[in-house]
Amino acid sequence: MDDPAVRLTIFAPGVLPRGYVRDLVPEIVWRFNLNQDISGFTRAFEDDEYLGPAIERWRGMKPVAANSLYETLMIYVVIQNAVVRRSIQMLEALFDRLGRDVRFDGRTMSTFWTPREMLRLKEVDLRRLKVGYRAKTFRRISEAFGRRSLDERLLREMPRERIEREVGDLYGVGPATLEYLLFEDFYFLDGLRLIPPWERKIMSRLLFRSSLVRESRILRFFHTRYPGYEKLAFHYLWEDLFWRRDRETIDWLEREIRRS
């Protein structure tokens, strides 16, 4: 904690170009969000009635962009309006057609496709993979990253308003998706503007012991109590709740899950 360090070991089938390694390091730093300091959040709310226990268990937790922006968008498209089993089926079909297998340490994993690889398929080809209306969305987003060269690294350097405009203009990206992206891919810790129905149900019970309260009431709670960190605070409470569910029975949560 006092003298932190991270060692990065890169495995490859051959010697990598020096430029590749040079570019890889800052990308890893960004993906694991190593440079963002959230100590102010911890100090401000470690004794908070709601957040305190979660911070004690998860001190230092912050958003991490495990995938590229393009890959994250592909996942978001697949999980829209679909149950888990259906989302898995669509992803497996896409990886079988477009992904590449990589073997490491005795395991085989699939890599994501590139926007240009996606664009080699026509919409009718994608529909044969049983992704339905999402075929058009896949192609439109891929066009933005491929042919029109939307550059994620340049986006990271832009002010929030510009990011919202550039990403919000992408086909299929609505207000809820944009809010998730701002937090999970660009690491803005505030900006809680929407509470989707499922999250609204859970937060109503967790914070107000009520079956359902107005969205505005939940938003006011976070904006008033955790200014500047509303989205991060929401994330801490959410992750902590489902971690506790793995270790104890939370009757009201189980009932909500069965209803959903």
Image (cartoon, rainbow, N blue to C red):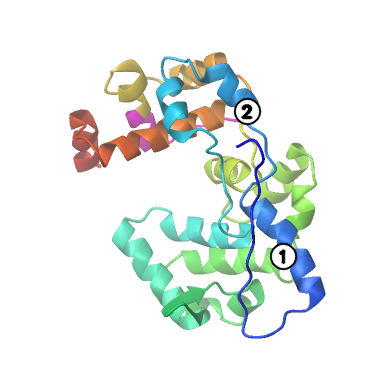
Residue 189 picture quarter: top right
Q: Residue at x 49, y 60 (%)?
A: 75
Residue 225, image x and y in percent? Answer: 53, 15
- Residue indicated by mark 1: 24
Q: Is 132 displayed left or right of 121 in the figure?
A: left
Residue 242 picture quarter: top left
Which amino acid does the dot numbered 2 rest on?
Ser
Q: Is 46 displayed left or right of 92 in the figure?
A: right
The C terminus: image quadrant: top left
Q: Secondary structure at mark 2?
A: helix
- Relative depth, front residue between 200 and 8: 8
Residue 239, image x and y in percent? Answer: 41, 38
Q: In the rendered view, would you say 128 is above or below 133?
A: below
- Residue indicated by mark 2: 39
- Asked if the residue at tag 2 contacts the one at tag 1, i.e. Cβ–Cβ closer than 8 Å, the answer is no
Q: Is residue 201 magenta?
A: yes
Q: Residues within 10 Å of mark 1 (few under 14, many from 20)?
A: few
Q: Residues within 10 Å of mark 2 (few under 14, many from 20)?
A: few
Counting residues from the start of the chain, the first of labels 1 and 2 encountered is 1
Q: In the rendered view, would you say 245 is above or below 69?
A: above
The N terminus: image quadrant: top right
Query: Is residue 257 visible in this depiction of the protein?
Result: yes
Which amino acid does the dot numbered 1 rest on?
Leu
Residue 187, image x and y in percent? Answer: 64, 41
Q: Secondary structure at mark 1?
A: helix
Residue 14 picture quarter: bottom right
Magenta residues (range): 190-202
Q: Is 151 displayed left or right of 139 in the figure?
A: right
Q: How many marks?
A: 2
